[in-house]
Image (cartoon, rainbow, N blue to C red):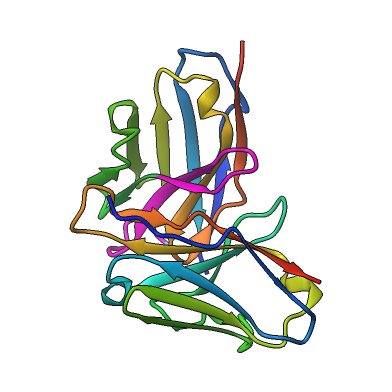
Amino acid sequence: QVQLQESGPGLVKPSQTLALTCTVSGGSISTGGSYWSWIRQHPGKGLEWIGYIYYGVSTYYNPSLKSRVIISVDMSKNQFSLRLSSVTAADTAVYYCARLPHDWGQGTLVTVSS
Amino acid sequence: SYVLTQPPSVSVAPGETARVTCGGDNIGSKGVHWYQQKPGQAPILLIYYDSDRPSGIPERFSGFNSGDTATLTISRVEAGDEADYYCQVWDRNGGHPVVFGGGTKLTVL
């Protein structure tokens, strides 16, 4: 079974860029057919898909976030990353990385505040 | 974009059967995944592609998908099943390929 672990700052200032990394173990991120995804959950709310990267190069983003999101892969480190620019308090959430639908990271809380 | 509709809450007594629905336009033509999320924890996959169970998921959890409704059935409900349940589909024809339902809070009375 693949394990995923999110890492990155837990506090980001408004207007800055949120940057998170997901480290994958127990499997290779270069294996085809996996949807390496980012999902977030606002406090007390449901799951919101942010985007995914597929076959290491094809990316698909939630249209509501598309202008601010970049997902990339570092195959040498078996990691994939999320960058969300121009953040506001509305981006405060628990961020999950996942190999949809099967495997999820434990999630990391990111708070946007000055 | 494609919309999945779940009831906000379902209540059931221990030992009874709980059914959580997920409605969507012709959802029967899509593969549906179901997740369980307990407070403070990450979601876990319960059912994938309508009715398959990952290893380690009890047989008490089953799924069915037809027409405009997918259903997660939990038999012989236990107190430990109290959680939020989410459905998810792939909508590759739209610009929003991953869609989650709003979630259903299952309360065990």
Rendered location of residue A26, percent (x, y)? 51, 63
> Would you say residue A57 sits in the magenta stretch?
no
Point 27% across, 59% down: residue:
B91
Q: Position of residue A102 (x, y in %)?
A: 47, 67
- Nearest the eye: B28 or B55: B28
- Specify the quadrant of the image occupied by residue A10: top right
* Residue A54 vertical position relative to residue B57 in the rendered view, above or below: above
**Which of these two is toward me, B59 or B5?**
B5
Write down the region rendered in magenta: A28-49
Residue drawn 43% across the image and 58% down it: A99
**Residue reaching furthest to the left:** B93
Q: Is residue B59 above or below residue A47?
A: below
Count every numbered label the image shows and give the total: 0
Q: Is residue B78 left or right of residue B4?
A: right
Which corner quadrant holds the C terminus of chain B?
bottom right
Residue B10's image quarter? bottom right
Residue A35: in magenta span: yes
The answer to which of B16 and A67 lies nearer the viewer is B16
